[in-house]
Structure formats: C-alpha cells, structure tokens
Amino acid sequence: MLPASSGAVAIRAARRADLDPVIALDARVTGLEKRAYWERIFRRYGQAARGEQRWFLVAVAGGEVVGFVIGEVRDWEFGSPPCGWLFVIDIDPRVRQAGIGTRLLSALCDAMRGAGVRTLRTLLAHDNTLILSFFRSQGMMAAKMIPLEMDIA
Ligand SMILES: CC(C)(COP(=O)(O)OP(=O)(O)OC[C@H]1O[C@@H](n2cnc3c(N)ncnc32)[C@H](O)[C@@H]1OP(=O)(O)O)[C@@H](O)C(=O)NCCC(=O)NCCS
C-alpha cells in the first residue's frame, strides 16, 4: 500500500468490487462482520440512481480501499428542511491521521452542496472521543436537536 501521506489517494464512488474490503475494514474496526447488512447498504447507497442524493464514497490508496463514507439528503424528517446526514465514516487504522478522513468528508460535503444542501448532520456515541475530535476539527458543532430513546422490549 502507498503511504496515504504521499497524496496518491483517490476518492470515488463505491463499486460492487469494493464491498469485500469495506466489509473487512468495518469488521476490523467494529469487531463484527455484517455481510448481509453491507449488501443492503450497497444496494441503497452504492447503486443509487443519479439525483437520488445518496452517496457511498471510498478512498483508494495503492489499489486498496482504505476508507469510506456514506451519507444522504433526508427531506423534512424530524421536522427539518432537507439536510445532509452522514451515517458512517471509517478509515483503515494503518493510514489514519494522514488527511484521508478529511478528504472523504470534504468530497461528501461537495456532493451535498451540489445537491443544494446547506447543513450536514450526524449522530455519534457520546463516549467516542476520536470521532468527536475528528468532527469538531472539521467544523461540526452541537446541533439544536436531542436524540431520544426508550426501552420497548
Ligand atoms: C475519525 C477518523 C474518521 C479520522 O480519520 P483520519 O483520516 O485519521 O482523519 P484526518 O487525518 O483527516 O484528521 C483530521 C483531524 O481529525 C482529528 N483527529 C484525527 N485523528 C485523531 C486522533 N487520533 N486524536 C485526536 N484527534 C484526531 C485531528 O484534529 C485531525 O487534524 P490534525 O491532523 O491537523 O490534527 C478515523 O480515525 C476513523 O475511522 N475512526 C473510527 C471511526 C468510527 O468510529 N466510525 C464509526 C462511527 S461513524
């Protein structure tokens, strides 16, 4: 693999052949392999028709997938005007802190801006300080929203 800092990192739309490395990267990061889940995600985000405002982007270095980001525009959900949501971003631990997460996020923002969206939102676990540091470094601030949950078992 080329060092990510060499600048030889390409960002492009995910293809079916990227699914195996994405599944492997997710399994490495989360400790769980979820093939059926990723197949569904690829059908929804990787094969979205133009104009559907869904993006599944990968970062490729030295011919290998080293990171990905997934997001979409949601219209009028939670009572808010159309806005971009980022669902997941993951960078291969071997090439972190080399600007790849920043490039993926920036590519997603460009695509969303092109779709006319002016706000990007995401949700994160309150104790995930790594992802919080990353999002804060990119300009993300606490939103005027409160996530709620309850036990319905
Ligand atoms: C968070 C993550 C996406 C960052 O990707 P990355 O390619 O390493 O990020 P970048 O190199 O673009 O870093 C940008 C900034 O983020 C912050 N940052 C990145 N890694 C950091 C770390 N380990 N500690 C503190 N801040 C960090 C820094 O402010 C950094 O800017 P700097 O290099 O000028 O200090 C990556 O670490 C990752 O995939 N982590 C696991 C993500 C996860 O939990 N995903 C599931 C939920 S979405």
Image (cartoon, grey):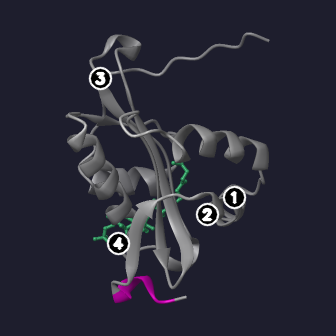
Q: Nearer the viewer, mark 4 or mark 1?
A: 1
Q: Nearer the viewer, mark 3 or mark 2?
A: 2
Residue picked out by circle 4: 99
Q: Which mark is residue 82?
A: 3
Indicate which disc, 3 or 1, sits on the residue closer to the N terminus. 1
Label 3 neighbour load within 10 Å: few <14, some 14-19, many 20+: some
Indicate which disc, 4 or 1, sits on the residue closer to the N terminus. 1
Q: CA distance from mark 4 to mark 2?
A: 21 Å
Q: Nearer the viewer, mark 3 or mark 4?
A: 3
* Amino acid identity at mark 1: Ile
Q: CA distance from mark 4 to mark 1?
A: 22 Å
Q: Residue at x 66, y 66 (%)?
A: 21
Ligand 1's quadrant: bottom left
Q: Secondary structure at mark 4?
A: loop
Residue picked out by circle 2: 18
Q: Residue at x 51, y 65 (%)?
A: 67
Q: Secondary structure at mark 3?
A: loop
In the image, 48: left or right of 40?
left
Asked where in the image residue 55 lies, by quadrant, the reply is top left
Q: Which residues are magenta?
A: 2-6
Residue picked out by circle 1: 23
* Amino acid identity at mark 4: Gly
* Amino acid identity at mark 3: Pro
Indicate which disc, 4 or 2, sits on the residue closer to the N terminus. 2
Q: Mark 4 near ligand 1 (CB under 8 Å)?
A: yes
Q: Where in the figure is residue 49, as x and y percent of width and height?
A: 45, 38
Asked whether residue 5 is drawn in magenta, I would say yes
Q: Residue at x 77, y 43 (%)?
A: 36
Instruction: Identify whether 51 is placed above or below 104.
Output: above
In the image, 84: left or right of 87?
left
